[in-house]
Image (tube, rainbow, N blue to C red):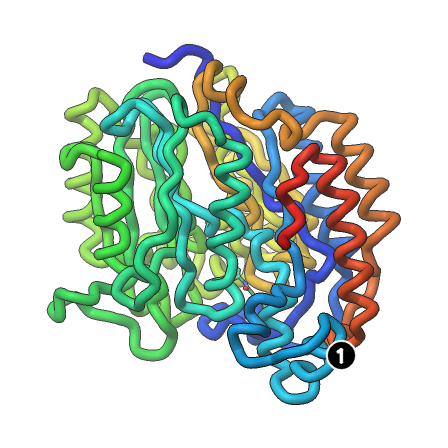
């Protein structure tokens, strides 16, 4: 068993271009807030405060930086030519949606950056990452090359880490990363069971798919990731997401379920063939000596609609030193009576989860991103943690530097029309240059 193993949460630092462009069909919050005015400064500070609070409580906390925006390469690939200012002006006039895609701050939702298997699960004893292609949405499909670059920079030591580039960029391999993956284990340093959740299958026509909204993630993608990571068959379990709830707005599994340690907290309607699936999961876990603690919420307690609007399952379930877990939820969970009542009962019983940590994240929430979306979990042994780039670990001094940087560079009001102003691009690039110095990552600036 690897020594001093801990789960690091790599939160996405919200970039200065955070805006509401309504780019994610099937994500109800994104569609509902289309064209509204965002507050990037508040968004970034809200996310940073969550990171700081969790670091102060003793959880291992790091961050992934925002990506350079606008993505001029996307505009080039779509046929725009000229200087940076000309690219922006032409795109704003002829194809404002493409400009919004080029400006999206969506890399902030790092649960979609990659799928991660810790070294205790993989064939070669290294920690494996497969970068997600996010090919269902244009604004997200442009993320993966830069994400790969950032992961290779942070996890550069090939003795410990193996980074796989994105799967083939075609609908058969729709991959949304860790948002559809959960690892269950007895302790972080021991071998676990990896649960992959997919929305549809490309090659098996008997697998039902949603009718209204897209299923972004395929079975074939999950299987490919398991192969790339060298996960043994006995240690992987595949569940299908219930297509009916995708059609209600559950665009990623982490909107309806979250796992940690040996616990799986989920809604009764989350999966197809729930009982059979849970039996498979439980038996796979038992073979590793892990007993599943299922916390099943039924529809009479909390409806799927309430779960979606409050994001109660888009929570972080964090192990505490005393063996109990804390649940990190967005403020919206306090405002929904059914959810607040359920959570109060859960905490009062205190069997597995005995603490609720609540954060104001409404800027991200309005684009469909709660606490779980904002973080990528990476389980690291002591040696692996020491081998990664240290500049991204959230310490009090990094918090202070970043808060001051946000105050200096971020706007507190950004409308879709503001993206048309070439001066904004220069403002953003200046901020990114300074960030690369703060994080000691010169590679952040995309040439
Ligand atoms: O992919 N929203 C993101 C939210 C991602 C949430 N992540 C997890 N559930 N893990 C998405 O739909 C909205 C952007 C806009 O509309 O401007 C957006 O991309």
Badge 1: few (under 14), some or many (20 or more) residues near its Cα, within 10 Å? Answer: few
Inspect this view and state whether residue 297 appears.
Answer: no
Residue plotted at (81% across, 47% down): 406
Point out the residue furthest to the bottom here: 94
Image mark count: 1
User: Image height check: is 166 above or below 421?
Assistant: above
Per the image, the residue denoted by label 1 is 417
Image quadrant assignment for residue 289: top left
The quadrant of the image that shows the N terminus is: top left
Residue plotted at (67% across, 44% down): 359
Indicate if the residue with disc 1 has its beta carbon within 8 Å of ligand 1.
Answer: no
* Left or right position of 246 against 421: left
User: Image height check: is 188 above or below 442?
Assistant: above
The quadrant of the image that shows the C terminus is: bottom right
Tag 1's secondary structure?
helix
State the image coordinates of residue 84 (x, y, percent, origin top left). 72, 70
Point out the residue furthest to the right here: 408
Residue plotted at (62% across, 25% down): 390
Image quadrant assignment for residue 158: top left
Inspect this view and state whether residue 388 appears.
Answer: yes
User: Image height check: is 211 above or below 6?
Assistant: below
Residue plotted at (40% across, 52% down): 132
Q: Looking at this view, is 277 or 41 the one in front?
A: 41
State the image coordinates of residue 157 (x, y, percent, origin top left). 46, 25
State the image coordinates of residue 179 (x, y, percent, origin top left). 42, 50
Point out the residue furthest to the front here: 82
State the image coordinates of residue 286 (x, y, percent, origin top left). 18, 26
């Amino acid at each position: 068993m690897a020594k001093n193993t801990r789960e690091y949460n790599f939160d996405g630092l919200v970039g200065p271009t955070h805006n509401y462009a309504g780019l994610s069909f099937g994500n109800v919050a994104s569609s509902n807030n289309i064209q509204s005015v965002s507050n990037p400064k508040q968004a970034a500070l809200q996310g940073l405060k969550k990171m700081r609070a969790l670091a102060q409580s003793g959880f291992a906390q790091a961050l992934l930086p925002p990506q350079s925006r606008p993505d001029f390469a996307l505009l080039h690939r779509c046929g725009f030519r000229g200087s940076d200012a000309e690219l922006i002006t032409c795109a704003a006039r002829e194809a404002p949606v493409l400009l919004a895609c080029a400006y999206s701050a969506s890399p902030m939702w790092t649960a979609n950056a990659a799928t991660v298997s810790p070294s205790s699960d993989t064939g070669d004893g290294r920690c494996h990452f497969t970068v997600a292609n996010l090919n269902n949405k244009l604004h997200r499909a442009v993320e993966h090359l830069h994400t790969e670059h950032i992961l290779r920079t942070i996890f550069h030591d090939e003795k410990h880490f193996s980074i796989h580039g994105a799967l083939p960029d075609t609908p058969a391999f729709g991959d949304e990363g860790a948002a559809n993956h959960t690892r269950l284990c007895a302790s972080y340093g021991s071998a676990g069971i990896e649960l992959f959740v997919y929305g549809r299958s490309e090659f098996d026509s008997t697998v039902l798919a949603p009718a209204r909204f897209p299923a972004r993630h395929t079975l074939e993608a999950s299987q490919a990731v398991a192969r790339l990571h060298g996960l043994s068959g006995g240690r992987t379990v595949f569940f299908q997401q219930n297509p009916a709830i995708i059609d209600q707005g559950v665009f990623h599994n982490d909107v309806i379920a979250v796992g940690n340690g040996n616990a799986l907290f989920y809604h009764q309607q989350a999966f197809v063939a729930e009982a059979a699936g849970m039996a498979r999961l439980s038996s796979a876990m038992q073979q590793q000596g892990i007993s599943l603690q299922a916390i099943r919420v039924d529809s009479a307690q909390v409806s799927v609609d309430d779960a979606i609007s409050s994001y109660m399952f888009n929570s972080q379930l964090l192990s505490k030193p005393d063996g109990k877990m804390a649940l990190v939820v967005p403020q919206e969970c306090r405002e929904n009576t059914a959810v607040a009542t359920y959570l109060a009962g859960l905490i009062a019983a205190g069997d597995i989860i005995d603490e609720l940590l609540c954060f104001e994240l409404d800027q991200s929430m309005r684009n469909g991103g709660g606490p779980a979306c904002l973080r990528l979990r990476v389980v690291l042994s002591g040696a692996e943690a020491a081998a990664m780039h240290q500049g991204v670990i959230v310490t009090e001094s990094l918090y202070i530097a970043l808060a001051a940087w946000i105050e200096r560079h971020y706007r507190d009001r950004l409308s879709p029309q503001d993206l048309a102003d070439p001066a904004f691009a220069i403002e953003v690039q200046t901020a990114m240059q300074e960030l690369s110095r703060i994080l000691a990552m010169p590679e952040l600036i995309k040439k």
